[in-house]
Amino acid sequence: MFLLHNPTPFISLLITIVTLIGSIDCQATYSSHICSDSQNSTANATYTSNLSTLLSSLSSKASLNSFYEDSSNGIYSLYLCRGDVSSNTCQTCVNNATQDIRQRCSSNRTAIIWYDECMLRYSNRNFLGVDQTYPRVLMWNSKNTTSPDEQNFGALGLIYTLIDYVPYTNTMFGTNQSAVPDGSQNRYALVQCSRDINSSDCSSCLGMLGDAVTECCQAKVGWRILAPSCSLRYEEYPFYQLSSTPPGTVPAAPEPGSEAKPGNGESNTKTWL
Ligand SMILES: *[C@@H]1O[C@H](CO)[C@@H](O)[C@H](O)[C@H]1NC(C)=O
Ligand SMILES: *[C@@H]1O[C@H](CO)[C@@H](O)[C@H](O)[C@H]1NC(C)=O
Ligand SMILES: *[C@@H]1O[C@H](CO)[C@@H](O)[C@H](O)[C@H]1NC(C)=O
Ligand SMILES: *[C@@H]1O[C@H](CO)[C@@H](O)[C@H](O)[C@H]1NC(C)=O
Ligand SMILES: *[C@@H]1O[C@H](CO)[C@@H](O)[C@H](O)[C@H]1NC(C)=O
Ligand SMILES: *[C@@H]1O[C@H](CO)[C@@H](O)[C@H](O)[C@H]1NC(C)=O
Ligand SMILES: *[C@@H]1O[C@H](CO)[C@@H](O)[C@H](O)[C@H]1NC(C)=O
Ligand SMILES: *[C@@H]1O[C@H](CO)[C@@H](O)[C@H](O)[C@H]1NC(C)=O
């Protein structure tokens, strides 16, 4: 056995390291969900039990795959982790999502749940490979930017440059950042498609969501648009792993809260079924 004369500092250092790693590595931050059945197609006991089997199997894939699709007994499902998260975070998020969605949509045969770090969906209809831009969730921080024209130009510029490029990458995921001209602020954008659809559908999906920015989000300091097949997000703080930061190190700037989340008085959500 390994003994130290005075183990206390060593142990508290260890706890600090574990806590830091844990807070970066194992988070699953709920964003939104939609149970989208018609009243008539509620899940019976057979469906629920087959769904449990399917979701357990799906969840077991998340330590090795950042995307996975699976179907059995007439139920179709997939998960997608955000392109920059570690396999640990992916696993935690998917595991949490499989449990959470069964509670939130316990009697529905079609459902989708989004976290900051992953999304998961299932249905009795085969959606695999189908570009779906509805149901859609629009979320924005109600805080207006001080220079709306410049902000829109900058935010949409980042998003549209990504939309031109990301669909033709392997993971159909991309982020980009830029500085506001006066240098006082950075802006951060993320776009991602579900990997069951092809590049041309990804491009079309992202284009549709880009057009939806005018419905909610122009001149807002933070927003996101979530759809089954793709998503967009914009913030004025870093919310993804910056590529210049080695994985596992502490980000220079802490994420300043969850300002664009539901439940917070400053945020807004609009759902289109
Ligand atoms: C989900 O199932 C519940 C219980 O049957 C039902 O009341 C609800 O309308 C369903 N949700 C949707 C969005 O259809
Ligand atoms: C839903 O159920 C009601 C009552 O059983 C039935 O009259 C109606 O036709 C059903 N609608 C659909 C779309 O299946
Ligand atoms: C349960 O739903 C499935 C379709 O999901 C259907 O085939 C089956 O007949 C239903 N079982 C009962 C007991 O209603
Ligand atoms: C799906 O449900 C049916 C009815 O309960 C059951 O016979 C079958 O074994 C289930 N399949 C799986 C993979 O659990
Ligand atoms: C999912 O994670 C949240 C914290 O992010 C926690 O409150 C919740 O209990 C977890 N749910 C499950 C089913 O693990
Ligand atoms: C933001 O700007 C819009 C449009 O000018 C205005 O309606 C809204 O009240 C403003 N919101 C805040 C929080 O200032
Ligand atoms: C990232 O943003 C910069 C500055 O706006 C731009 O020049 C560059 O093309 C963008 N790169 C990608 C991959 O979108
Ligand atoms: C992409 O997938 C859609 C739907 O499956 C299909 O209609 C389309 O032809 C595909 N496009 C390409 C370029 O493969």
Image (cartoon, rainbow, N blue to C red):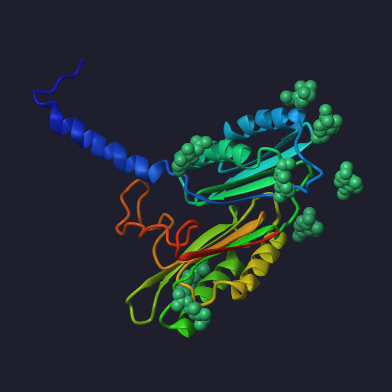
**Residue located at (35% from left, 45% from top):** 248
Figure check: 169 above or below 110: below
Residue 197 screen position, x and y as percent: 70, 53
Which residue of the protein is positioned furthest toward the left in this rendering?
5
Closest to the observer: 248 or 266?
266
Residue 260 screen position, x and y as percent: 47, 62
**Residue located at (37% from left, 48% from top):** 247
Residue 5 screen position, x and y as percent: 9, 23
Closest to the observer: 35 or 145?
35
**Residue located at (67% from left, 60% from top):** 202
**Residue located at (80% from left, 42% from top):** 41
Camera sees residue 228? yes
Which residue of the protein is positioned furthest toward the top in this rendering?
1
Closest to the observer: 46 or 175?
46
Horizontal side of 16 relative to 47 (left or right) equals left
Residue 31 screen position, x and y as percent: 53, 53
Asked which quadrant contains residue 239, the reply is bottom left
Asked which quadrant contains residue 255, the reply is bottom left
Q: How many marks?
A: 0
**Quadrant of the image containing the N terminus:** top left
Figure check: 130 above or below 94: below
Horizontal side of 165 relative to 92 (left or right) equals right
> Which quarter holds ligand 3?
top right
**Quadrant of the image containing the C terminus:** bottom right
Horizontal side of 110 relative to 29 (left or right) equals right
Camera sees residue 87? no
Figure check: 94 above or below 247: above
